[in-house]
Image: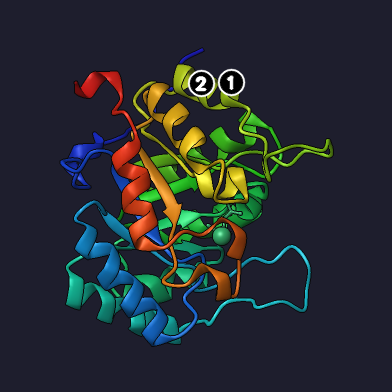
Amino acid sequence: MKLNLNIQPLNTWINTGKQPLLIAGPCSAETEDQLVATAHLLAKTGKVTALRAGIWKPRTRPGEFEGIGSIGLKWLDRAKQETGLPTAIEVATGKHVEEALKAGVDILWVGARSTVNPFTVQEIADALKGVDIPVMVKNPVNPDLSLWIGALERINGAGITKLAAIHRGFSSFEKSAFRNEPMWDMAIALKTQVPDLPIINDPSHICGNRDLLPYVAQKALDLDMQGLMIESHIDPSVAWTDAKQQVTPSALAELIDRLTLRKADV
Ligand code: PEP
Ligand code: MN
């Protein structure tokens, strides 16, 4: 069954000239210096399409760093002004959406722990009514294609046509080399059901470590996914969140150089 969502082609709302399309930046905005310095190094590689950073962090367990909060939006804006990179953050409540829009964030995404909850997704969708901004929807933490599609429908139903999905892998109780099982079939099934929908791959949260990133990123491009979201930190060893999976901007540039572009581009 094919689903007709009202979706604008990717190249009408994000620069698809860079190959591959790459959204990069730290898991979390930690300090103004960390964010701005990382952004400058990423911009200097010439390979980055947009800057990502987590401002509000959905931590699985309490007692860990839960994001720097609203003050980080100012740092993100400074990074944008200084580098020219459009910015992307996760939103998990209606209030996050309001604050992000006020702060001039360019792209929003719904995180895996929000996509599982239709009330949360609907709250985000309601806050987006009448707004024209790109929104990306990560897959839910569990391998439930309907929840993923349902979230996309809710956001699209609010009038968001600059829409994409992010494939970040799925929780599994089984022991695995991956932090989140890629379950590539889920992304393929999404593409089959919603053919117009761009899918961006997030190797960072699939792998949970740096070593597997090239393999997963290449596989995503081989499957004709439209881009990558990869976490990059100026000094991953001291990152406050997801330290094991982040790469320096220069390591990211090398990783991208070694990828073979998807067939459609050659
Ligand atoms: C993130 O992008 O840092 C994040 C929390 O991702 P996910 O929602 O995929 O776990
Ligand atoms: Mn992260």
Q: Are marks 2 and 1 in contact (CB under 8 Å)?
A: yes
The vertical placement of 23 against 32, above or below, is above
Q: Which residue is located at x 65 percent, y 78 percent?
A: 65
In this figure, what is the number of numbered marks? 2
What is the C-alpha distance between the residues marked 2 and 1? Answer: 5 Å
Secondary structure under the numbered disc 1 in the rendered image: helix
- Name the side, left or right, on which 75 lies relative to 123: left
Residue that numbered label 2 is attached to: 188
**245 or 159: nearer the eye?**
245
**Residue at image mark 1:** 185
Badge 1 density bin: few <14, some 14–19, many ≥20, Cα 10 Å: few
Q: Is residue 86 visible?
A: no
Residue 241's mark?
none
> Dot 2: within a 10 Å radius of its alpha carbon, few (fewer than 14), some, or many (20 or more) residues?
some
Q: For the point 51% across and 21% down, which residue is it?
A: 188
Give the residue displayed 58% in from the left and 49% down from the top: 205
Instruction: Tell which quarter ligand 2 is in.
Output: bottom right
SS at badge 2: helix
* 84 vs 168: above or below: below
